[in-house]
């Protein structure tokens, strides 16, 4: 077998490990789930050793599946859930559970920041508008509510960086994950001394930031024995899970975009310069590819909206029912015969940043049946992604190439809906799990097999390209304007309901 890498994707609910060669051929993958700890209100923690044990389990499974010992592994590259972090003492020992990006207990910190203007001061220093998702507010919550643990803390590591530490003994992070802390200056690509002073934390709490394509160390003797691998394998710095997936989807330079219909929805575009949205509607983070920034719009509940529908109305349906839903939606006309869905089942992130936002089915008539509701959900998610893409165009970013990825992108009708709603040509990557290719591309850049990101274009293969239908696009544009009106005219009522 040819030179290959181990690609690790440390997700929110499980870890996936894949073996892929330098031509993009995937020899095998293994997956291991782990639980969220949600005992108290707002809590969402994980045992970081579950990640490590999951990695061990996946590597052992791959040993059995594909005789891993016979493959020449030239690198290990990792990506993972953003914001989620681990507290380590001065000896590098774990001090407790990791706090995940889903944890909401830092809302008291965010409320305080808003009252005192700290959020605005941080925005000016970092171009990041902090929310409960970010790492620093959660660290400050820990400082206040778990003083004994905090006083013992020497370092705070983001999830995938913790695994890199166990693999190599080195503590390093990358610009994409540093962007999700709240004290990283995304313009200059470094920790902001002033931001740390504003929030009252010491800068040394977080590790050094190195480029995503850096070799940050080598697989140690002790870890190699546990994993059954050769010691000395280079470990690549890596990046956040969504950004590495974007790289693998073909977002290699300016003019490229990635549209994700996953649990959440994401519309991301690559820019050669940092772009600030003074209205704070979308996000700008540092991208793993040097010299680029990642503009992001995030829909809180995308494919999970359809999962909610399944769980609520077809609880015995299983995974196979989603194909049935696609067939249903394909037999409903554009616009779901006047039924519009707002996909705000868990509030909304960009562009509204409204935790009180709630979902709406608008325009229900006696003629509407189950297929109409299914298609309306798909269309509502597409409208939300379009809303984010239009803000990027307003800010001067208008990508020419858009790849559609994520679980929802497997649906042919959802592919067509997104194409027509955006009124843009869409391509569907051959490998749906594009984080595998993203990790491969980072590794090949790190090992100097590629000199620049564009050299990786040959690895990005599409199964098909879809062109928008002009008539459908015209109708969707009119419906999109109504979609926006519905939110603007109901958001006050949503807040009142949330306060009851």
Image (tube, grey):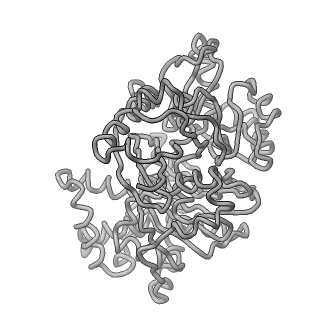
| Residue found 45% across the figure and 56% down from its top | 2
Residue 272, quarter of picture: bottom right
Does 282 sit above or below residue 58?
below
371 over 289 or under it: above or below: below
Q: Nearer the viewer, residue 329 or 53?
A: 53
Visible in this render: residue 406?
yes
* View extreme (bottom): residue: 471
- Front residue of this view, candidates 361 and 38: 38
Residue appearing at x 43%, y 25% in the figure: 49
Above/below status of 161 relative to 304: above
Q: Quadrant location of residue 15?
A: top left
Instruction: Give the residue at the far top of this rendering.
Output: 148
Q: Position of residue 258 (x, y in %)?
A: 54, 64
Instruction: Indicate the quadrant containing the N terminus: top left, top right, bottom left or bottom right.
Output: bottom left
> Could you tell me residue 349's position as x and y percent?
55, 51
Q: Nearer the viewer, residue 160 or 74?
A: 74
Q: Is residue 408 left or right of residue 180?
A: left
The image shows residue 124, relative to residue 247, as above or below, that is above
Q: Write the residue at 36% across / 34% down.
A: 34
Q: Is residue 273 left or right of residue 452?
A: right
Residue 447 locus on image (x, y percent): 62, 50
Q: Is residue 352 visible?
A: no
């Amino acid at each position: 077998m040819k030179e290959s890498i181990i690609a690790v994707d440390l997700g929110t609910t499980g870890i996936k490990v894949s073996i892929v060669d330098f031509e993009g051929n995937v020899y095998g993958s293994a997956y291991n789930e782990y639980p969220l700890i949600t005992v108290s209100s707002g809590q969402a923690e994980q045992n970081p050793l579950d990640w490590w044990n999951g990695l061990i389990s996946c590597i052992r499974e791959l040993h059995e599946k594909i005789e891993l010992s016979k493959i020449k592994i030239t690198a290990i590259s990792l990506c993972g859930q953003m914001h989620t972090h681990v507290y380590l003492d001065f000896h590098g020992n774990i001090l407790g559970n990791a706090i995940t990006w889903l944890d909401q207990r830092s809302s008291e910190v965010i409320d305080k920041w808003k009252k005192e203007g700290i959020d605005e001061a941080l925005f000016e220093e970092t171009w990041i508008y902090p929310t409960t998702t970010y790492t620093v507010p959660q660290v400050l919550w820990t400082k206040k509510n778990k003083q004994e643990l905090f006083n013992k803390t020497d370092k705070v590591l983001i999830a995938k960086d913790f695994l890199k530490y166990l693999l190599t003994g080195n503590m390093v992070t990358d610009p994409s994950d540093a962007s999700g802390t709240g004290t990283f200056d995304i313009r200059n690509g470094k920790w902001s001394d002033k931001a740390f002073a504003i929030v009252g934390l010491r800068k040394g709490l977080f590790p050094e930031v190195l480029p995503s394509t850096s070799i940050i160390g080598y697989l140690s003797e002790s870890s190699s024995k546990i994993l059954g691998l050769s010691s000395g394998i280079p470990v690549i710095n890596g990046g956040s899970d969504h950004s590495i997936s974007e790289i693998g989807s073909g977002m290699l330079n300016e003019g490229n975009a990635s549209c994700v219909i996953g649990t959440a929805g994401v519309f991301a575009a690559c820019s050669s310069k940092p772009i600030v949205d003074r209205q704070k509607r979308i996000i700008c983070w540092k991208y793993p590819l040097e010299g680029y920034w990642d503009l992001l719009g995030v829909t809180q509940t995308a494919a999970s909206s359809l999962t909610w529908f399944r769980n609520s109305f077809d609880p015995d349906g299983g995974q196979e029912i989603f194909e049935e839903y696609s067939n249903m939606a394909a037999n409903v006309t554009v616009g779901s015969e006047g039924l519009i869905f707002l996909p705000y089942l868990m509030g909304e992130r960009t562009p509204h940043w409204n935790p009180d936002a709630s979902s709406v089915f608008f325009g229900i008539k006696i003629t509407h049946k189950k297929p109409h509701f299914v298609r309306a959900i798909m269309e509502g998610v597409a409208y939300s992604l379009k809303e984010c893409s239009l803000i990027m165009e307003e800010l001067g970013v208008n990508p020419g190439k858009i790849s559609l990825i994520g679980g929802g992108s497997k649906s042919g009708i959802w592919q067509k809906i997104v194409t027509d709603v955006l009124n843009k040509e869409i391509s569907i990557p051959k490998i749906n799990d594009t984080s595998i290719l993203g990790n491969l591309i980072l590794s090949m850049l790190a090992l100097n097999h590629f000199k620049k990101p564009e050299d990786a274009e040959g690895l990005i293969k599409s199964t098909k390209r879809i062109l928008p239908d002009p008539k459908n696009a015209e109708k969707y544009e009119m419906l999109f304007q109504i979609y926006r009106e519905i939110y603007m005219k109901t958001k006050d009522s949503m807040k009142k309901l949330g306060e009851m």
